[in-house]
Image: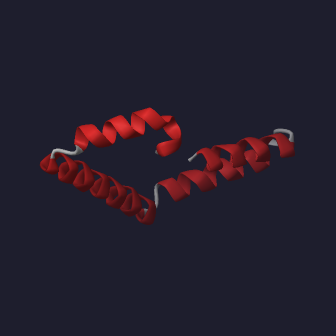
Amino acid sequence: MFVLGAFLVGYYLGTKSEEGDLNEVVDSLRTIAASDEVRELAAGAFGMATDLVRSLAADGRAGEVVERVAGRGLRAV
């Protein structure tokens, strides 16, 4: 998501806010975000994350993983 945001900022600055070009990008992003493929991808990622958390909780390792990730900061994510 960060890369997409950086792209949009760069594009915006590059076009010097020419409204027509910027509106095209916004419309394209809305179309992409509303697509079935993106929704399925997001649902799949959420499902995988849910399964992982449940698995770690069942093994009693959830606390260990949280401590390791928290110790590394956001770079671990």
Q: Nearer the viewer, residue 25 or 74?
A: 74
Q: Quadrant of residue 12?
A: top right
Using the image, determine if residue 25 lies above or below residue 16. below
Q: Residue at x 62, y 56 (%)?
A: 28
Residue 45 is left or right of residue 52, and the answer is right
Of 22 and 71, which appears nearest the observer?
71
Q: Residue at x 43, y 66 (%)?
A: 37
Q: Would residue 27 be found to the left or right of residue 58 on screen?
A: right
Q: Identify the residue at horizontal 40%, vertical 39% (top origin).
A: 69
Q: How is the image coloured?
A: secondary structure
Q: Residue furthest bottom?
A: 37
Q: Quadrant of residue 14?
A: top right
Q: How many marks?
A: 0
Q: Position of residue 54 (x, y in %)?
A: 18, 50
How far across and how far down the image is residue 17, in percent?
A: 81, 39
Residue 30 vertical position relative to residue 74 in the rendered view, above or below: below
- Is 15 displayed left or right of 73 in the figure? right
- The residue shown at (74%, 46%) is 22
Picture coordinates of residue 45, whole percent (x, y): 36, 57
